[in-house]
Amino acid sequence: MPRIRYTIGDAERAVISRGGRFLTIVGPGTHYGRFVTVETHSTLNAAFSSPWAEILWRTRPDVVARHFLPVETAERQLALVRVHGRLEAIVGPGQRQLFWQPATAEILDLDAAPEVPAALFTAIERTNAAALKVYEVAAGMAGVLCRDGRFVRVLEPGRYGFWQAAAPVAITLIDLRRQMLEVPGQEILTRDKVSLRVNILAEYRVADPATAAIAVQNYGETLYRLLQLAVRSTLGKRSLDEVLADKVDIEPESAATVRREMAALGVEVSGIALKDIILPGEIRNILNQVVAAEKQAQANLIRRREETAATRSLLNTAKLMEDNPTLIRLKELETLERLTEKVGTVNVHGGFDGLLSKLLPS
């Protein structure tokens, strides 16, 4: 039987077998053989993917050493395979694989180095995106990194990558900007048993993100509860009149307690204030009536003062007229002028005195 001719390209290798038994691996060129099977592989694909790979690994270490780079990882390891400095493959934990020469491999310990350098993100996403988990911490935020349930460190704004095969990581995002917390519609009973509804406002910021994320389940809810207790402690000791007269705010002692307890949780509380005090409808109506009565009394007092002043002025005028006949005459003329303004025609008989006697009868 004639020999078989087969040609291998420059970027190819061929596995030659006969009757299911491995014979050799040949490189570029024209080759001949009898009763052989030729399995061609492109060396542009760094990984050697063939049923012969496991057989060669076990039985032909000499062939493996001549043509391949053997890469084997333990259960907590991962390998980065490069060809001419370019990342071509990632070998996961507990795997082994052959790669065509020339190739290099970097073995990583997932327990010691679970984090991926940012410089590798693009290469890994191109090669095997599923091997990488990327987290992003936005500006004004902090990321609290925990691994295996244990705190590791605080992440500043940026992108962070971790190997999917490493121990699971959890990143809690914490807002570091100043925030306002409003506690609306709190029903409070004053000392004299009047029910008020108040709104509380507090300004705060997270000063220690690690403590805020770990020491308490939800620091916002904790601050909410502390503000409720503070306003109840403040208004519960005062009567309605004291609340309205003094424009009551949160007691300094209660506010200091809120700030101290929140500081222990990594949260800095600055301003605390009562935003609104809302009275029940019936109390509001009564207070409106009281205010209306007070204003009416003030108006009456002002009217009495004006009447008294007017009477005093008339008395003074009468005294002056009694002592000065000329002033009386001037007053008569002033009165006559006002009367004649409303009369169309005036006939004078008997002189000026006759006119006065007719218009102003005694």
Image: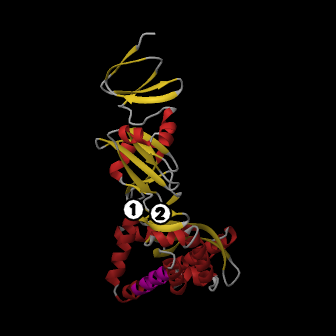
Magenta stretch holds residue 309: yes
Q: Nearer the viewer, residue 362 or 209?
A: 209
At label 2, the amino acid type is: Leu
Residue 150 seen anywhere in this rendered image of the structure: yes
Label number found at residue 145: 2
Q: Nearer the viewer, residue 355 or 150?
A: 150
Q: Which element type, helix, strand or loop, lies under badge 1?
A: helix
Residue 249 position (above or below residue 126): below
Q: How is the image coloured?
A: secondary structure
Q: Would you call the spot at circle 2 few (<14 residues within 10 Å), some (14-19), or many (20 or more)?
A: some
Q: Nearer the viewer, residue 123 or 154?
A: 123
- The location of residue 168, given as percent across then percent down, is 53, 57
- The location of residue 324, given as percent across then percent down, is 34, 86
Residue 280 quadrant: bottom right
Q: Check the image and name the residue furthest to the top.
A: 1
Residue 168 position (above or below residue 30): below
Magenta stretch holds residue 211: no
Residue 277 seen anywhere in this rendered image of the structure: no
Residue at 36 percent across and 66 percent down: it is 337
Residue at 39 percent across and 62 percent down: it is 340
Q: Are marks 1 and 2 in contact (CB under 8 Å)?
A: no
- The location of residue 189, given as percent across then percent down, is 68, 78
Q: Is residue 186 left or right of residue 5?
A: right
Q: Which residues are magenta?
A: 305-316
Residue occupied by mark 1: 340
Residue 329 position (above or below residue 281): below
At label 1, the amino acid type is: Thr
